[in-house]
Every structure is written in structure tokens, then in C-alpha cells.
Image (cartoon, coloured by chain):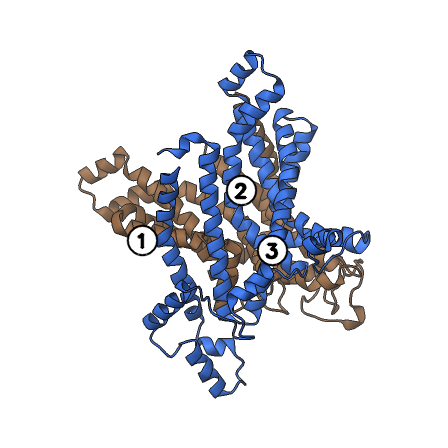
Chain colours: A brown, B blue
């Protein structure tokens, strides 16, 4: 009883936080798309005479060690973070969804092989696998996107497989089969639409983690290469100036933290909307 | 219990095979020639050819795989192409800081999570609960490299209480060694503490509403005995599950933490190997980390059997 009351309470709290999340997400999207228009300075323009300048009216978040405007770089970095978060999760959702559909729907040996493969991917700590893959694929955003997609694929594959198994056992699938629908027709028209809601929920919760993961990889020096701006690489570059110019680290750091929290709230809201049992 | 162990071990074998195959193919995933990827263009062609032959890259891939597996089964994980040191020796030299770091982080997280989680659930919606819930959200959304820099900024640069990088072995240097590990361990431990607190709190809340708790209270057990013997014991299983699930995050976090604080651990070794493009070393260390990860997951599974006698059968 108390637990149910707690759940209602939690949902109410989340309902209050969801608008905050939506505002953050929307703001980030606008900044990412309109970065060339809204950023006050050129993110790449150096000005050694004005390096490590304190936040001021001209440079709201100060300047970095070569005099670039931190705020402008944070704004351009939004692009990288959002692309990394959404594209890698979309890739993982598609690949994992197809693999899970194939495994759950065919069953037997295909199922066994595919799922052991997913187990194998999960046998690596996510960051270590992403790091190793990013390393051999070469630095750059594409390598990171592929690496993150590989890391997140098993989650979606397992989820999809479970969905398919539980849906194919239901009566409407039997009915469709009895009416003479082909295997693919059943998969496409009956199984897939019913399996999407949990996939979307998982996807929306994963984006925040994918953004964190991209930032971690960029922090370690993989990912998009300098001088282009990404939050992770900016934070890494500012490490050495923590004493003189903490804004180089905490400008992009705050952007990252707020985005991740906002996306978490949005993810929770999506879950509450689509999954009444949670 | 014996049968449980055997069954879990059996299920691990195909996964192990796939893991080794994956690590082996890592080298062949490089776009273009792996030797060119590892060495600068300026390096002499004969040197490149020698390395190619040493690594067996002039052989067909199935032959390479067979040879690699054979060496692996003899305990040879390859050697670094930069300094020729065998992978096992490199890792052996660096395992201690990593283990000390993770053990300390684990301790810190449990020391925080248990009191906060238990009190949050017991005094539900009280002040501890409110602070604890916000702390959990903070810990989950805060990337650990950022937390590390925040701690360095506050305790290292501004207050100058603690060293911000470098490592002294606490087992040899004692107090100053421990001091060198405080910030890294707190960095790594806080995120874990957040997750454990949240899990413990919700599983305690659930256990507190069970009939057996009411029965235990009705028969006059002290509140402490009810909490310890009935609530906590039943609330522990989700915590163990989460600790198991978080192992991967903990290892990944250790990689970043070691990098930020310049600790000479295994995580740092991976990052260095990646940037030196020392692919055989990357392969060896990644494989060892995966093996360690699989082994610890096995241990976690077996822990269930110890906590919940019902799972020993079946």
C-alpha cells in the first residue's frame, strides 16, 4: 500500500520535473541547430592576447587557454553531444531491434547464436569496449558513433526478443496466422507495432547515457578531434587550467550535467506515458 | 549449490569463445592495414615487414586465429609492440593500484549507501530521505570525470587538503598512500553509492510493507531485530543484483578515474595503449578485463545462492 502511494508521489514529482526536462531538451536542440546564429563568437577564433579571460559581458563564460570564447564553443559542442546521443541510440535501436526480432521470431539455433553474441558483447565493460572499438576504428565522430551503437545494441536486442516471445504467444497472433497471414506479415503488422513502446522507452532512457559516454570518450581523446569543440574534449583541455580558469572546465561541465539531467526527466516522463505499469 | 556452479560455468563457455573471437578480430577491424595503423608512415618498410611477420599478419586469418588461441591457452596474451613487455607482466605491475582503488571505492559507497538507504526507507519522506533522493539523482547524472575535476578543484586546488594526482601504495607508504587514493576513491565511489542507495531504499520500502514484517512486529520482536533479520535480509537481493550490474560501470569509471588522477593502474594502461596504437597490448588488456568481469559476474550469481537458499536448488 505504502509502495503504491510512493509511486503516485514519485509520478507527481516527475510530472513536475518533466517540463524542466522538456525545456532543457528543446533548448539544447535549438542551440544545436542554430549554433552558427546564436553563438556570440567564432568557436575556433583564437586570441592569444585575451587568453584565460574571466567571464565578462563580452565573453559570458570567459575564454580558454588560446583565447577562444567558451560559451560559443559550448554551443557548438551541443551539436556533437546531441548527434552522438541520438544517432548512436537510433543505430543501436535499429540493429538491436532487427536482431531481437530475428532471434525471437526464428528461435532455435539462430536465436541461440544471436543471443550468445549479445552476451559476449555484454561481457565487456561498456566503456572499455567503446574505447577499444573507438581506437581501432580511428578517432573521429563516426568511430565513436559505431562504438557506442555496438555497446548499446544488446540491450535493445534482448528487450525486443523478450517482447517478440511474449507477443507471439498471444491470441491475436494465432488468429492472424489462422487467417493465413504470412510469417513476415505477422512480424511486420502484428508483432512489431506491439513491441515498439518498450523499445522507445528504453531508447529515450539510453540517450542520456550515450551522451555521457560520448563525453567520456572525447574526454579521453577519442571522438571529434580538436580544434572542433565537444564538451568532453573541452573539459579535458581545461584540466590544466583548473586553478587560473575553472570556467573552461565548468562551462561545458554544467552544460553536460544539465542536459543529462533534463534527458533523464524526459526519459522518465516517456516511460510513465507509455508504460503504465512502471 | 554445486549444480548451480556447474550450470553457470557451462553457460559461460560459448560466451568465452565469442569474447576471444571478438578480441582477436579487433586488430582486423582497423580500416586499412593494421600495421600502417600502428606505425607512422615514416617507419622503414623492412621494420614493418618484421612486425607483420612477428604478429603473423602475413598468414591467412583462420591460421592466425588458431595460433593466437593456442598461445592464449598457454597463458600467452601477447606482448606490447612498443616495449616488448608481455601483457601479463604489464598488467601484473599495474593491478595493485586498480584493485586498491576499486576496493576503497566500493567500501566508501557501501558506507554511505547503507545508512542513507536504510534511514531513507525507514523514515520515508523525512529529511534524510529527501536529501538522499536528490543525492542519488546527482550521483547518477554526474559524469565521473567532471566529479573528479570538481573534487580536485575544491579539495586539491582551492583548499589544498589532498593531493590531486600521483600514487603512493597505501600498503607500503601507509597514511600518505591512503591520502593519495582518497579523491580517486571518492570519485569512483559516489556514483556507485547513489545507485546502491536508490536500490536499497526502494527494496526496503517494499519489504517493510510485507506481511512477515507485521507478523514479526506482532510477535514482539524489537524494531532492530525486525529491520536486521526480516527487512534488510530480504531487501539485499536487489542490492546484490545492482552491484553486479554496476561492476562494468565501476571498471569503466576506474579507467577514467585513473586517467584523471594519473594513477598507474590497469585502466591507465588501456588508455595509454590506445593512444600508443599498441593494438596487441590493447587486445591483451581488454581480454583480461573482460575475463575479470565475467568471473566477477559469476561470483555475483553464486552470491545469490548464499543470500537466498531457495536459489540453491533449481
Residue B3 coordinates in the image, percent (x, y): 35, 39
Q: Residue at x 38, y 62 (%)?
A: B21
Q: Residue at x 76, y 56 (%)?
A: B163
| Residue B288 in the image: above or below residue A188 | below
Q: Nearer the viewer, residue B145 or A95?
A: B145
The residue labelled by disc 3 is B98
Q: Residue at x 72, y 54 (%)?
A: B177
Crowdedness of circle 2 by 10 Å Cα count: few (<14), some, many (20+)? many
Find out whether the residues at labels 2 and 1 contact each other: C-beta distance under 8 Å.
no
The residue labelled by disc 2 is B243
Pinpoint the chain carrying mark 2: B
| Mark 3 on the same chain as mark 2 | yes
Pinpoint the chain carrying mark 3: B
Q: Residue at x 48, y 65 (%)?
A: B284
Residue B136 coordinates in the image, percent (x, y): 62, 39
Pinpoint the chain carrying mark 1: A
Secondary structure at badge 2 equals helix
| Mark 3 on the same chain as mark 1 | no
Rounded to the nearest angstrom, the CA distance separating label 3 from label 1 is 34 Å
Looking at the image, is mark 3 or mark 2 nearer the viewer? 3
Question: Which quarter of the figure has residue A174?
Answer: top left
Asked whether residue A98 is in view, the answer is no
The residue labelled by disc 1 is A113
Q: Seen in the image, is A244 located left or right of residue B30?
A: right
Rounded to the nearest angstrom, the CA distance separating label 2 from label 1 is 28 Å
Residue A207 coordinates in the image, percent (x, y): 52, 50
Find out whether the residues at labels 3 and 1 contact each other: C-beta distance under 8 Å.
no
Q: Which mark is residue B102?
A: none
Crowdedness of circle 1 by 10 Å Cα count: few (<14), some, many (20+)? some
| Mark 2 on the same chain as mark 1 | no
| Residue B28 in the image: above or below residue B136 | below
Amino acid at each position: 500500500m505504502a509502495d503504491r502511494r510512493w509511486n503516485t508521489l514519485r509520478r507527481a514529482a516527475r510530472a513536475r520535473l518533466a517540463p524542466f526536462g522538456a525545456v532543457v531538451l528543446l533548448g539544447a536542440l535549438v542551440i544545436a541547430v542554430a549554433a552558427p546564429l546564436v553563438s556570440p563568437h567564432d568557436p575556433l577564433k583564437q586570441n592569444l592576447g585575451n587568453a584565460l579571460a574571466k567571464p565578462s559581458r563580452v565573453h559570458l563564460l570567459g575564454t580558454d587557454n588560446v583565447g577562444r570564447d567558451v560559451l560559443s564553443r559550448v554551443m557548438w559542442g551541443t551539436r556533437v553531444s546531441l548527434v552522438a546521443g541520438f544517432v548512436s541510440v537510433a543505430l543501436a535501436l535499429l540493429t538491436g531491434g532487427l536482431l531481437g526480432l530475428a532471434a525471437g521470431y526464428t528461435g532455435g539455433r539462430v536465436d541461440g547464436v544471436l543471443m550468445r553474441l549479445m552476451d559476449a558483447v555484454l561481457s565487456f565493460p561498456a566503456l572499455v569496449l567503446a574505447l577499444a572499438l573507438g581506437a581501432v576504428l580511428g578517432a573521429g565522430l563516426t568511430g565513436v558513433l559505431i562504438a557506442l551503437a555496438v555497446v548499446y545494441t544488446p540491450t535493445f536486442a534482448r528487450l525486443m526478443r523478450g517482447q517478440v516471445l511474449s507477443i507471439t504467444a498471444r491470441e491475436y497472433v494465432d488468429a492472424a496466422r489462422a487467417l493465413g497471414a504470412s510469417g513476415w506479415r505477422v512480424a511486420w503488422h502484428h508483432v512489431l507495432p506491439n513491441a515498439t513502446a518498450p523499445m522507445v522507452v528504453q531508447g529515450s532512457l539510453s540517450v542520456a547515457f550515450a551522451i555521457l559516454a560520448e563525453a567520456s570518450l572525447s574526454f579521453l581523446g577519442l571522438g571529434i578531434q580538436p580544434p572542433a569543440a565537444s564538451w568532453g574534449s573541452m573539459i579535458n583541455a581545461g584540466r590544466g587550467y583548473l586553478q587560473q580558469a575553472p570556467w573552461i572546465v565548468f562551462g561545458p561541465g554544467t552544460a553536460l550535467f544539465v542536459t543529462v539531467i533534463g534527458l533523464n526527466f524526459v526519459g522518465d516522463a516517456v516511460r510513465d506515458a507509455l508504460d503504465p505499469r512502471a | 549449490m554445486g549444480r548451480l556452479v556447474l550450470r553457470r560455468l557451462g553457460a559461460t563457455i560459448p560466451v568465452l569463445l565469442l569474447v576471444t573471437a571478438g578480441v582477436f578480430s579487433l586488430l582486423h577491424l582497423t580500416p586499412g592495414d593494421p600495421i600502417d595503423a600502428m606505425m607512422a608512415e615514416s617507419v622503414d618498410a623492412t621494420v614493418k615487414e618484421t612486425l607483420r611477420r612477428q604478429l603473423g599478419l602475413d598468414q591467412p586469418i583462420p591460421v592466425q586465429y588458431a595460433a593466437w588461441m593456442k598461445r592464449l591457452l598457454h597463458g600467452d596474451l601477447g606482448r606490447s609492440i612498443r616495449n616488448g613487455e608481455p601483457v601479463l607482466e604489464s598488467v601484473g605491475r599495474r593491478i595493485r593500484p586498480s584493485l586498491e582503488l576499486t576496493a576503497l571505492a566500493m567500501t566508501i559507497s557501501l558506507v554511505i549507501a547503507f545508512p542513507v538507504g536504510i534511514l531513507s526507507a525507514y523514515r520515508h519522506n523525512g529529511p534524510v530521505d529527501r536529501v538522499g533522493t536528490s543525492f542519488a539523482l546527482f550521483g547518477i547524472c554526474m559524469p565521473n570525470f567532471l566529479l573528479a575535476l570538481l573534487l580536485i578543484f575544491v579539495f586539491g586546488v582551492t583548499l589544498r587538503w589532498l593531493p590531486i594526482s600521483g600514487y603512493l601504495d597505501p600498503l607500503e607508504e601507509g597514511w600518505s598512500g591512503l591520502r593519495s587514493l582518497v579523491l580517486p576513491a571518492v570519485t569512483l565511489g559516489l556514483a556507485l553509492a547513489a545507485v546502491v542507495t536508490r536500490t536499497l531504499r526502494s527494496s526496503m520500502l517494499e519489504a517493510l510493507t510485507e506481511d512477515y514484517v507485521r507478523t514479526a512486529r506482532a510477535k514482539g520482536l524489537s524494531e532492530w531485530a525486525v529491520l536486521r533479520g526480516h527487512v534488510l535480509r530480504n531487501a539485499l537481493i536487489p542490492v546484490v543484483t545492482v552491484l553486479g550490474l554496476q561492476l562494468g560501470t565501476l571498471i569503466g569509471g576506474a579507467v577514467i578515474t585513473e586517467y584523471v588522477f594519473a594513477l598507474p593502474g590497469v585502466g591507465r594502461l588501456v588508455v595509454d595503449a590506445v593512444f600508443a596504437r599498441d593494438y596487441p597490448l590493447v587486445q591483451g588488456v581488454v581480454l583480461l578485463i573482460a575475463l575479470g568481469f565475467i568471473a566477477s559476474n559469476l561470483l555475483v550469481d553464486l552470491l545469490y545462492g548464499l543470500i537466498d537458499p531457495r536459489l540453491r536448488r533449481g
